[in-house]
């Protein structure tokens, strides 16, 4: 095995931190890689039709025969000469003699249709000699044992599909570069071909790197995460005409990682790694790639957000790509920069992109000097489409599934002002706002209601931005429903103080909020809420975990602690689950969350208040039937809500 490439003189040991190479703009990175690697199809192979779906046709396909190969009837009826039934009508039917044969699919005619005669014929059967039309059976009636009365005058050629009327011999049927699907298979089979030439699919090795990675299905050890990049990259490769060859997750061991990379490079047409391309002390991947073959690394570092650590290399004629380790960064850079290269290798045309214009309701801050991609979910307001940012950071795996597309903030801009019109590139050309848009506070119970809606065939988009943010979106007409749980300190009531004549409140459920802590912590265990809170605020070593501004839980927390700013106050996650996880893992000692979340992690819980989680809707909603459907789903979810520990009313 070759030695790992040595750092340059003066750079220190192999494990020392190294900076990125010169950062390239997105356009520079693409241009450099295209100049170094002339991506083109890898060859042609012939495959049978039963394995052809999804493959890319490698040559233009012309029809060797006519389809249909003979004139045939398109209805059940009678083949005859149109002149023999000219003038026929309901009031004056014309009688023709029946020929002594019946024509069905797959039977060749024996008798010609002579003047004054007709032959019974089934749909799809060949037209007999002499006939020039077919009269539907509905436009006739029996006339004795050997006659038929025609009650409607036909036109020549009526109800006949002529030879070659669907596909003519020599007609160009499909062009090279066509992705074969069920419809194409039908056409190819109709012209009698059992196999077709297709481009060979590039075999692309997929390697995830990192000591922290555990394969899906295996138990997580402390500080480990499941490898999501490997499966998602493999799926994206299949979508772009490639065959993914999975090598699993390889730890950050130089010898083991180098062996995996070299084996993948020898076996496949391209190699994609994820992780190990940023400027960290443990990042070895890009240096191993640099020594894999000439010319080596073309680009390392691209002025993108997310996606800066992208590394593009070419080793002995094969592309080697190191994607960033975070899922969102990995997939953005894959689809934007890597997929076009692989599509050319697979013989696929460039991916067709669909763009729409939408208003961005909030200000988006960006980093000067880097093109930034922001994922968005689409809703509608009275003036058109609205694009809500759904980014949860480069490490989020759900944002891509929740988003309809993305917008781009140029490198020279430091922000996109609220209310700006932006061009949205859709992930799916058919993407559109869902039946119901729900924006506001999130709760596990809301997922149960969404499941009821799904069973009714309705789609709901749920964006968790907090109660106050949801109300603002509702007043702007950007959503249908705003889940809220906001306490009025003056009255002690939830939510009603926020409802004016333009809104109404749909009662949801009640859930217990409380002080959450580890059950073995003597500062909380066995005490009242007041005593536990006093102990926490008096101890400078007692760390809290807060909630984000605008959340109903944050309003409750602020009412409890007043002007106090205990340690950890600035730690402000957006979800109850994050609060409970921080306490369970020892990163914080106390916080406020709902009881089901605390119980699920075996945490202590001191009840504070039973809050009302309700739904604000417009008094005059834009889609009243959808609001009715939501209320029906809410009622249907009652058993699931009860199982979660929530109480209706």
Image (cartoon, rainbow, N blue to C red):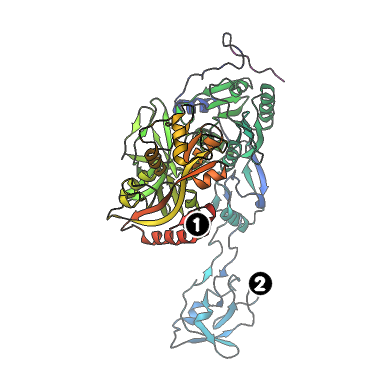
Evaluate if marks 2 and 1 touch, with contact meaning CB atoms under 8 Å apart. no
Residue in the foreground of this view, choosing between 36 and 517: 517
Quadrant of residue 276 in the image? Answer: top right
Instruction: Tell me the CA gap for discs 2 and 1.
Output: 50 Å
Q: Residue 563's spot in the image, x, y percent?
A: 35, 33
Farthest residue in the right direction?
1
Q: Which residues are magenta?
A: 1-8
Q: Percent position (x, y) of residue 498? A: 31, 50
Decide whether residue 432 is among the magenta residues: no
Quarter that holds the N terminus: top right
Q: Nearer the viewer, residue 10 or 334?
A: 10
Looking at the image, residue 148 lies above or below residue 5: below
**SS at mark 2?**
loop
Q: Residue at x 61, y 77 (%)?
A: 112
Q: Which residue is mark 2?
A: 107
Query: Image point 46% across, 61% down: which residue?
Result: 635
Mark drawn on residue 454: 1
Q: Does the image show residue 476? A: no
């Amino acid at each position: 095995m070759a030695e790992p490439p040595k750092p340059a003189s003066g750079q220190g040991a192999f494990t020392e931190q190294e900076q990125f190479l010169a950062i390239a703009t997105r356009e520079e990175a693409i241009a450099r890689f295209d100049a170094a690697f002339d991506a083109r199809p890898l060859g042609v192979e012939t495959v049978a039709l039963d394995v052809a779906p999804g493959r890319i046709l490698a040559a233009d396909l012309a029809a060797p025969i006519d389809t249909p190969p003979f004139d045939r009837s398109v209805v059940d009826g009678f083949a005859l000469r149109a002149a023999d039934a000219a003038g026929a009508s309901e009031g004056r039917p014309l009688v023709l003699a029946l020929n002594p044969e019946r024509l069905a699919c797959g039977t060749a005619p024996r008798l010609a249709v002579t003047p004054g005669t007709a032959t019974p014929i089934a749909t799809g059967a060949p037209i007999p000699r002499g006939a020039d039309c077919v009269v539907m059976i509905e436009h006739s009636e029996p006339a004795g044992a050997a006659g038929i009365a025609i009650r409607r005058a036909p036109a020549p050629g009526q109800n006949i599909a002529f030879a070659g009327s669907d596909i003519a011999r020599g007609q160009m049927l499909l062009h090279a570069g066509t992705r074969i699907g069920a419809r194409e298979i039908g056409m190819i089979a109709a012209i009698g071909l059992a196999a077709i030439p297709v481009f060979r699919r590039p075999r692309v090795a997929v390697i995830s790197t990192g000591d922290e990675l555990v394969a899906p299905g295996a138990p997580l050890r402390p500080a480990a995460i499941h490898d999501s990049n490997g499966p998602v990259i493999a799926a994206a490769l299949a979508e772009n005409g490639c065959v993914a060859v999975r090598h699993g997750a390889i730890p950050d061991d130089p010898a083991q990682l180098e062996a995996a990379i070299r084996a993948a490079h020898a076996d496949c047409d391209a190699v994609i790694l994820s992780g190990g391309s940023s400027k960290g002390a443990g990042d070895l991947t890009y240096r191993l790639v640099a020594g894999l073959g000439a010319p080596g690394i073309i680009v390392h570092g691209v002025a993108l957000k997310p996606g800066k650590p992208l590394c593009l290399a070419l080793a002995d004629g094969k592309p080697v790509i190191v994607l960033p380790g975070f899922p969102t960064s990995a997939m953005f850079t894959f689809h934007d920069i890597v997929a076009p290269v692989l599509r050319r290798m697979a013989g696929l045309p460039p991916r067709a992109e669909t763009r729409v214009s939408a208003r961005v309701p909030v200000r988006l801050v960006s980093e000067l000097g880097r093109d930034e991609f922001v994922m968005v979910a689409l809703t509608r307001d009275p003036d058109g489409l609205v694009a809500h940012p759904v980014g949860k950071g480069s490490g989020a795996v759900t944002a891509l599934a929740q988003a309809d597309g993305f917008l781009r903030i140029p490198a020279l801009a430091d922000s996109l002002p609220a209310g700006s019109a932006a061009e949205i590139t859709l992930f799916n050309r058919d993407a559109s706002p869902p039946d119901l848009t729900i924006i506001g506070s999130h709760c596990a119970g809301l997922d149960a209601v969404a499941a009821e809606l799904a069973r009714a065939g309705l789609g709901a988009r749920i964006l968790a931005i907090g109660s106050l943010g949801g109300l603002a979106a509702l007043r702007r007409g950007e959503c249908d429903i705003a889940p809220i749980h906001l306490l009025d300190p003056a009255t002690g009531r939830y939510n009603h103080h926020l409802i004016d004549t333009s809104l109404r409140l749909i009662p949801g459920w009640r859930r217990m909020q409380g002080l959450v802590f580890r059950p073995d912590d003597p500062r909380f265990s066995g005490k009242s809420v007041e005593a536990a809170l006093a102990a926490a605020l008096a101890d400078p070593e007692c760390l809290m975990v807060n909630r984000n501004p605008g959340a109903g839980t944050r309003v409750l927390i602020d009412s409890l602690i007043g002007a106090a700013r205990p340690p950890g106050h600035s730690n402000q996650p957006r979800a109850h689950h994050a609060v409970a996880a921080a306490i369970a893992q020892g990163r914080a000692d106390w916080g406020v969350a709902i009881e089901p979340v605390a119980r699920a992690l075996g945490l202590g819980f001191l009840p504070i208040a039973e809050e009302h989680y309700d739904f604000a809707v417009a008094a005059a909603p834009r889609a009243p039937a959808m609001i009715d459907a939501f209320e029906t789903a809410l009622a249907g979810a009652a058993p699931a809500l009860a199982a979660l520990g929530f109480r209706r009313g």
